[in-house]
C-alpha cells in the first residue's frame, strides 16, 4: 500500500470489557478504597483465593485486611444482625447472603429491623447496609437455591431492591447502593455472572430508581430486568422479523421502580409486556401491570400482559428447568401474540 493510501487516523478506542462478576468486585474494591467505613462480611468472603462461592470478593481481604473483609459462620441472621449493628455506629456494611433462598433465615432481621429502624426512630437512625445475594435458574441447583423472591422485599416498606443485567450497571448500582442511607437488596443472577459487556469507569454511579431504555421501539413496550432482560434482547431478532418494533426497558431498580419512564413508553406504544424470572402470580409484574392499566386505560391497544415462571418450585431436572423460566423464544411468541390483537 502506498503512503498516500494509508489511513493514519487513530483507531477508535474500544471500551474495556468486564464480566458482571468482575464489575461487582471492582465496585466493592473502589468503594472500600474511597471510604474507610465500607465493610464486607459473609460466608467465605475473606478467602483470598476463592472470594466466596463464585469469587465476587476475591482479593479484597488481601488488599483491605480481615478487619474490613470478614468471613462469618454459616448464620444468615447473625450476618444481617452484625451488619445492622455496624451501620448504627457509622459503618457501611455490604453483607453477602450466599443464595437468595437463604434470606428466609434472616427475614426477621431484614424486615423487622433493617427496613423499619429509620421509621421507628422518626428518621433519626439510618441503616446504610447492602445485602448482596444471588439466585437464578439454569444451573440445576433445585428449588431451594434458585428462587427469585424480589417481590417479598419490594413489598417491604423501607427496603430498596436492585437487579442489574449488565456489567456497567452492576458497577454503578453497587456504588449507588453502598452510598444510600437505607437498606438495599442487591440481586445478582448466577448464570449471568460471566456475561461480558462494557466496563464502567471508576466512580460511575447509576441512580437508584432510574430505568434504562435498552432499545427504542414504537409497537410494544417490554419491561424486564436481570437475566430475563438478557433473554428479551435475544428475542429481538424474531420480534423484528415479525415486523414488530419493540421498546425494551431495563428496570434496574425494582423498588422504587421508575414509573415515569415505563408509563411514558407505554403511552407511546400502547402495549405492555412485563417479563421476569420469578413466578408470574403475585409478582412484581402484577404491580407494574396494575399501574399501567389504571393510568393508561384509554391509551392501551391491547390488554397488559405478564410473562413469568409457573406457580411451582424450580425443578431440579435440567429439561424441566429449561422450560420453567421465560426464555427468548417464549418472549418473542408472547410479543407477537399481543401485537396481533386488534387495536
Image (cartoon, rainbow, N blue to C red):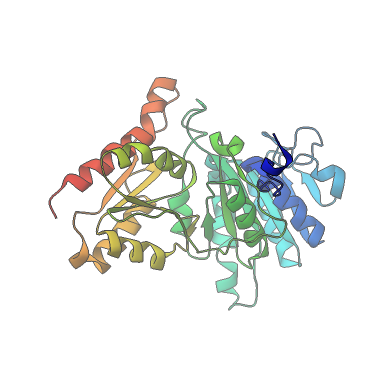
Is residue 325 or residue 211 the one in the foreground? 211
> Where in the figure is residue 2, as x and y percent of width and height?
71, 37
Residue 276 quadrant: top left
Quarter containing the N terminus = top right
Residue at image point 47% right, 50% down: 150
Q: Position of residue 86 (x, y in %)?
A: 74, 60
Q: Residue at x 75, y 33 (%)?
A: 50
**Residue 55 visible:** yes
Depth check: 69 or 102 in front? 69
Dividing the picture into quadrants, the one containing residue 238 is top left
Q: Is residue 273 above or below residue 86?
A: above
Q: Identify the residue at the far left of this view.
A: 342
Residue 233's quadrant in the figure?
top left
Relative placement, left or right, of 160 versus 236 is right
Residue 310 visible (yes or no): no
Position of 343 with respect to 111 (left or right) is left
Q: Quadrant of the C terminus?
A: bottom left
In the drawing, does residue 78 fall left or right of residue 322? right
Q: Position of residue 323 (x, y in %)?
A: 36, 28
Q: Is residue 254 above or below residue 119?
A: above
Percent position of residue 93, x then y = 71, 57
Amino acid at each position: 500500500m502506498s503512503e498516500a493510501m494509508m489511513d493514519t487516523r487513530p483507531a477508535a478506542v474500544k471500551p474495556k470489557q468486564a464480566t458482571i462478576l468482575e464489575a461487582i468486585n471492582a465496585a466493592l474494591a473502589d468503594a472500600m478504597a474511597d471510604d474507610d467505613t465500607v465493610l464486607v462480611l459473609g460466608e467465605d468472603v475473606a478467602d483470598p483465593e476463592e472470594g466466596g462461592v463464585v469469587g465476587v470478593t476475591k482479593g479484597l481481604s488481601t488488599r483491605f485486611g480481615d478487619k474490613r473483609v470478614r468471613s462469618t459462620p454459616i448464620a444468615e441472621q447473625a450476618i444481617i444482625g452484625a451488619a445492622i449493628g455496624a451501620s448504627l455506629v457509622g459503618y457501611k456494611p455490604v453483607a453477602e447472603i450466599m443464595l437468595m433462598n437463604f434470606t428466609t433465615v434472616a427475614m426477621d432481621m431484614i424486615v423487622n429491623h433493617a427496613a423499619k429502624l429509620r421509621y421507628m426512630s422518626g428518621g433519626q437512625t439510618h441503616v446504610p447496609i447492602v445485602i448482596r445475594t444471588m439466585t437464578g435458574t439454569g444451573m440445576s441447583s433445585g428449588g431451594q437455591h434458585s428462587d427469585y423472591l424480589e417481590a417479598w422485599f419490594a413489598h417491604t416498606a423501607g427496603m430498596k431492591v436492585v437487579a442489574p443485567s449488565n456489567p456497567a450497571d452492576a458497577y454503578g448500582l453497587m456504588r449507588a447502593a453502598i452510598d444510600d442511607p437505607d437498606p438495599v437488596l442487591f440481586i445478582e443472577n448466577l448464570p449471568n455472572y460471566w456475561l461480558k459487556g462494557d466496563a464502567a469507569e471508576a466512580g460511575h454511579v447509576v441512580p437508584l430508581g432510574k430505568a434504562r431504555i435498552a432499545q427504542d421501539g414504537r409497537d410494544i413496550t417490554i419491561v424486564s430486568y436481570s437475566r430475563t432482560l438478557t433473554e428479551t434482547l435475544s428475542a429481538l431478532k424474531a420480534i423484528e422479523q415479525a415486523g414488530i418494533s419493540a421498546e425494551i426497558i431495563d428496570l434496574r431498580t425494582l423498588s422504587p421502580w421508575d414509573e415515569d419512564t415505563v408509563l411514558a413508553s407505554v403511552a407511546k406504544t400502547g402495549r405492555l409486556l412485563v417479563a421476569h424470572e420469578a413466578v408470574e402470580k403475585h409478582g412484581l409484574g402484577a404491580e407494574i401491570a396494575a399501574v399501567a392499566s389504571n393510568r393508561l386505560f384509554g391509551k392501551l391497544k391491547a390488554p397488559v400482559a405478564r410473562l413469568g415462571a409457573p406457580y411451582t418450585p424450580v425443578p431440579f431436572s435440567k429439561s424441566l428447568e429449561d422450560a420453567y423460566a421465560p426464555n427468548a423464544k417464549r418472549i418473542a411468541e408472547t410479543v407477537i401474540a399481543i401485537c396481533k390483537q386488534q387495536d
